[in-house]
């Protein structure tokens, strides 16, 4: 039987709800590397409700400090509108401050791992995620134009640094196959605990919709499928009709049947909760987003021979070793590059442009 906690709270009082989550789903963090991954879609203000609220992250970090000592890392790889702006995204969302010194830009170092060859043989995953003994995911209770809702499974999409996210979007080609892709990314490293910020949720055409909803809850579970099924039911959706949940169940990652889930709290459907169409048309047909994704995935770095001093910093910093020095000028292997923008960010001479 999978368990899902539903605990009423507010941002001011969420420490208690977070503490309850750790009581119900105990983990021993002492002496371990613990990676905490909030949902940081892009640089946005906390009141926009796009990212996990800093109050929830702070409560989790403080609880881990109390339960430790543990080697805590807080990080995420923001989405398509904030590639190359990891630090700025954490600053603006208030999550850098809430991380209490444990924030790290996890987009600077990646490990290549085997993936579903139908889309891409290998993908780069942030090293901090793969090296962690314990991964704690902090999703936001939100809708999503392509996958209908974003919760525990979709939050793991951010373990991929840079434009790989957009690249896989493009390779998937449509909402149906994108559901498969997000589950394949999720199972590269399923988190051990999920604590969902549902104090303020998002309805309408998320994941960056202006339609916020006061829900006043924290949800938690150690199983992503059961948790996402519970979020779906609260939104008035039938989990069995969500393709990513069907696939996750087929792969043995959990269950969405009511009979398989014990609710610790009260599951209530949120009245008149606005959700995007089930087929993902809300985003698939958005010409601007499709073009933007395309534009981000075709960019590659190019060093300006007039400015470059051949210092090698960009080559050392590239997380996937896509750069090599050719005639004193860093040169990119376009197929290996994941368009993470790290080389551009690190170049002391500002010699790199993306073309
Ligand atoms: S070449 Fe630059 S943009 Fe490409 S993966 Fe390496 S650091 Fe990232
Ligand atoms: S970091 Fe900048 S200056 Fe140094 S080798 Fe790379 S492009 Fe040239």
Image (cartoon, grey):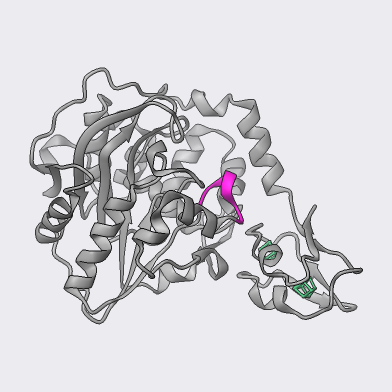
Q: Residue at x 78, y 58 (%)?
A: 353
The relative height of residue 184 versus residue 344 in the rendered view (above or below) is above
* Rendered location of residue 305, percent (x, y): 90, 69
The residue furthest top is 272
Q: Quadrant of residue 323?
A: bottom right
Q: Is residue 319 above or below residue 97?
A: below
Q: Quadrant of ligand 2?
A: bottom right
Is residue 221 left or right of 188 when viewed as pictured? Answer: left
Quarter where residue 288 is shown: top right
Front residue of this view, candidates 295 and 45 = 45
The residue closer to the viewer here, 3 or 11, is: 11
Task: Determine whether, in the image, residue 285 is placed left or right of residue 241.
Answer: right
- Queried whether the magenta region covers residue 85, the answer comes back as no
Rendered view: 117 above or below 176: below
Which portion, as a residue range, is magenta? Answer: 78-84
Picture residue at 43% right of the left edge, 49% below the top: 93
Name the residue at 43% across, 31% down: 206
Tell me where residue 237 appears, x and y as whole percent. Answer: 28, 26
- Res. 343 in view: yes
Q: How many marks?
A: 0
């Amino acid at each position: 039987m999978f368990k899902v906690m539903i605990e009423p709270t507010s941002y001011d009082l969420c420490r208690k709800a977070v503490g309850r989550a750790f009581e119900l789903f105990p983990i021993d963090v002492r002496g371990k590397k613990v990676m905490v991954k909030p949902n940081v879609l892009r640089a946005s203000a906390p009141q926009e409700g796009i990212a996990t609220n800093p109050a929830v992250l702070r409560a989790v970090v403080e609880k881990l400090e109390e339960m430790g000592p543990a080697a805590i890392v807080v990080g995420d790889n923001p989405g398509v509108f904030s590639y190359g702006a990891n630090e700025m995204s954490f600053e603006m969302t208030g999550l850098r401050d809430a991380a209490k010194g444990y924030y790290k830009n996890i987009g600077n170092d990646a490990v290549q791992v085997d993936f579903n060859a139908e889309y891409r043989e290998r993908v780069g995953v942030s090293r901090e995620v793969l090296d962690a003994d314990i991964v704690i995911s902090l999703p936001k209770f939100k809708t999503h134009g392509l996958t209908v809702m974003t919760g525990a499974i979709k939050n793991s999409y951010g373990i991929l640094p840079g434009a790989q996210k957009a690249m896989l979007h493009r390779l998937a080609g449509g909402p149906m196959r994108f559901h498969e892709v997000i589950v394949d990314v999720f199972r590269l490293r399923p988190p051990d605990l999920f604590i969902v910020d549902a104090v303020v949720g998002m309805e309408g055409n998320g994941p960056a919709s202006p339609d916020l909803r006061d829900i006043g809850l924290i949800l938690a579970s150690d199983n992503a499928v059961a948790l996402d099924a519970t979020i779906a039911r609260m939104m008035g959706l039938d989990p069995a009709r969500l393709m990513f949940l069907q696939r996750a169940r087929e792969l043995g990652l959990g269950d969405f049947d009511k009979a398989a889930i014990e609710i610790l709290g009260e599951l209530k459907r949120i009245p008149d909760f606005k959700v995007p169409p089930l087929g993902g048309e809300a985003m698939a047909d958005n010409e601007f987003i499709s073009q933007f994704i395309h534009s981000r995935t075709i960019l590659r770095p190019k060093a300006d021979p007039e400015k470059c001093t051949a210092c090698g910093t960009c080559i050392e910093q590239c997380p996937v070793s896509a750069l090599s020095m050719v005639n004193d000028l860093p040169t990119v292997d376009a197929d290996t590059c994941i368009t993470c923008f790290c080389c551009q960010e690190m170049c002391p001479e500002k010699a790199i442009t993306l073309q």
